[in-house]
Image: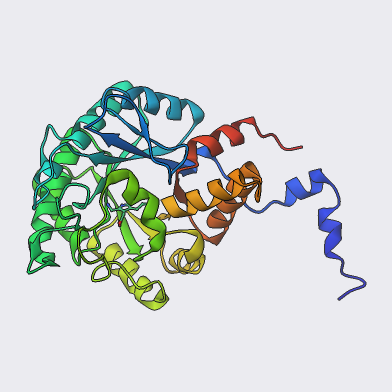
Amino acid sequence: MYPQERMRRLRTTPRVRSMLREGSLRPEQLVQPLFVDENIADRREVATLPGQYALPLGKVGEECVRLERLGVGAVLLFGIPRRKDPLGSEAWNHEGVVQRAVREAKAACGIPVMTDLCLCEYTDHGHCGKLRDDQVDNDATLELYGRIAVSQAAAGADMVAPSGMMDGQVAAIRSALDREGFQGTGIMAYSAKFASCFYGPFRDMVGSCPSHGDRRSHQMDPANARQAARELRMDAEEGADMLMVKPAMPYLDVICRARQDHDLPICAYQVSGEYAMLRCAAALGALEMKAAMMESLCCIQRAGADLIITYFAAEAAEALGGERPV
Ligand code: PBG
């Protein structure tokens, strides 16, 4: 008890603080999302996601090389196709945008490549699966997810990342991959994915806003932590190699519980709206960009994430590379 016990002894100098720092972030623990757009010839920015660019095919390789040099752990690829249809059939086209992007990345360097696996970027209605009477038909969609997984694995993806929140998607994808000889391709499951307003800038970037309705019949209610625990458990049982919580900062309790409940790697996705929030506040002079970025990532790690998918990956890796203990 005070006055014998004094916490400030542990904070006296920069060296003492550095010695006692409980967590330390490595660039390898960060995953950079990359958007690849089949409709463009030059990189494209959207106002709501400042500093992030959709890349044309042909520019993916050099970006992956740059990220690899910075020490970034992996890239997560999103495709924006030229052609959308009600089923989203471009998503499993072997010559589709994401499949070509994977091959380009793999030819350029050794950075691990993950692929987002969903249909909302590929359907003309913007929903995450096949519709029946304006509702996403869960079981019919699983078969399509299996085809996408196989085509992404065939293109060379190291891990597929199903984000559609269909029931049974991990098991369906695992068995489709195994059936086609892709036993070595991993699944990073978006397990506890909430129906969050923080995906807004992402949808501006990829044009995946649903033309009617929303995603609340499959994504989770932000109020539900116990349900999130069940989702995580089911994905682990279905054979996921990694579990993900998304978004990250508003859901640190969910990350913390995931860490306690599981021995699988836990991944957290600091989503587009979280990034935009910090960027825009910094642009106004309300926050210092680098400090806000590093604190947000440190806190996500402290909550229990092994891996963080973040639009700050490149920038944070750069900052970490230059940072030495004082
Ligand atoms: C679905 C998907 C979304 C995000 C990642 N995968 C959007 C959604 O569910 O509507 C959001 C990522 C972000 O906001 O950064 N393919």
- Residue 129, by quadrant, is bottom left
In front of the other: 186 or 146? 146
Q: Is residue 148 above or below residue 6?
A: above
Lateral position of residue 59 relative to residue 145, left or right: right
Lateral position of residue 186 relative to residue 133, left or right: right
Q: Position of residue 248 (x, y in %)?
A: 46, 58
Colour scheme of the rendered structure: rainbow
How many marks the image carries: the answer is 0
Q: Is residue 264 visible?
A: no
- Residue 239, by quadrant, is bottom left
Q: Position of residue 193 (x, y in %)?
A: 34, 63
Write the residue at 50% across / 69% down.
253
Q: Is residue 140 above or below residue 54?
A: below
Write the residue at 23% across / 28% down.
103
Q: Is residue 303 visible?
A: yes
Lateral position of residue 9 relative to residue 186, left or right: right
Q: Position of residue 36 (x, y in %)?
A: 28, 35
Q: Position of residue 292 (x, y in %)?
A: 62, 49
Write the residue at 47% across / 40% down.
50
Lateral position of residue 316 relative to residue 142, left or right: right
Quarter containing the N terminus: bottom right
Quarter containing the C terminus: top right
